């Protein structure tokens, strides 16, 4: 009987050292906060679809050039509510912390993207927030 109790106690001690680390899709632990950087673009009426495609491609290339970006997604408006006010493109950039965002903003690749975007931009809306669960 005492031997069984000792085996159970030893097993409990060993198992208590095991931690399950559930990961999110971006590789961070499920309980870690991330900083979201949401960017919406409204393009000038004079911008062609080819010029807008070049901007999409340039923004999509940023995660490969800026190590501080830990996740990225984008898309174009498909809302049926008609509240988009001319904004057609949404880019969703995720950072692990404020320092990563601070490194991204003046990054040469981000600045170069701004030069491509600038002549075609009518309006931009940017919202940053800590992801809440």
Image: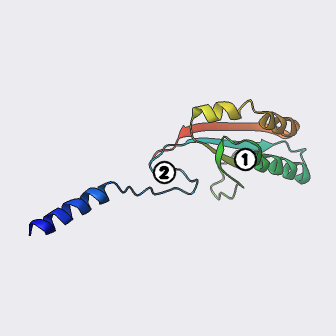
Residue sticking out furthest to the front: 3
Instruction: Report the label total.
Output: 2
Classify residue 103 by image quadrant: top right
Q: How is the image coloured?
A: rainbow
Does the CB distance between marks 1 and 2 fall below 8 Å? no
Against 54, is 118 above or below?
Answer: above
Q: In 3D space, how far apart are the residues under numbered discs 1 and 2 (Cα atoms)?
A: 20 Å
Q: Position of residue 133 (x, y in %)?
A: 44, 48
Q: Residue at x 70, y 35 (%)?
A: 104
Q: Position of residue 93 (x, y in %)?
A: 65, 45
Q: Residue at x 26, y 56 (%)?
A: 13
Identify the disc placed on residue 29: 2
Classify residue 1 by image quadrant: bottom left
Q: Position of residue 73 (x, y in %)?
A: 67, 53
Q: Position of residue 128 (x, y in %)?
A: 59, 37
Q: Residue at x 77, y 37 (%)?
A: 110
Residue 87 can be seen, yes or no: no
Residue sticking out furthest to the left: 1
Q: Is residue 19 left or right of residue 60?
A: left
Q: Nearer the viewer, residue 52 or 133?
A: 133
Q: Is residue 105 left or right of residue 51?
A: left
Identify the residue position indicated by label 1 in the image: 63
Q: Earlier in the sequence, mark 1 or mark 2?
A: 2
Q: Is residue 33 left or right of residue 4?
A: right
- Secondary structure beneath dot 2 equals loop
Q: Residue at x 91, y 53 (%)?
A: 50
- Secondary structure beneath dot 1 equals helix
- Classed neighbour count for the residue bearing mark 1: other residues with Cα under 10 Å, few (<14), some (14–19), many (≥20): some
Q: Nearer the viewer, residue 15 or 60?
A: 15
- Classed neighbour count for the residue bearing mark 2: other residues with Cα under 10 Å, few (<14), some (14–19), many (≥20): few
Against 75, is 39 above or below?
Answer: above
């Amino acid at each position: 009987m005492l031997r069984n109790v000792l085996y159970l106690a030893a097993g409990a001690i060993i198992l208590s050292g095991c931690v399950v680390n559930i990961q999110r899709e971006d590789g961070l632990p499920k309980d870690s906060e991330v900083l979201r950087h949401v960017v919406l673009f409204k393009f000038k009426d004079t911008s062609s679809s080819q010029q807008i495609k070049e901007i999409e491609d340039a923004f999509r290339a940023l995660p490969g050039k800026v190590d501080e970006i830990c996740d990225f997604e984008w898309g174009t408006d498909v809302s049926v509510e008609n509240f988009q006010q001319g904004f057609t493109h949404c880019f969703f950039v995720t950072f692990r912390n404020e320092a990563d965002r601070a490194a991204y903003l003046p990054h040469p690749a981000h600045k170069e993207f701004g030069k491509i975007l600038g002549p075609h931009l009518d309006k931009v809306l940017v919202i940053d927030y800590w992801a809440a669960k």
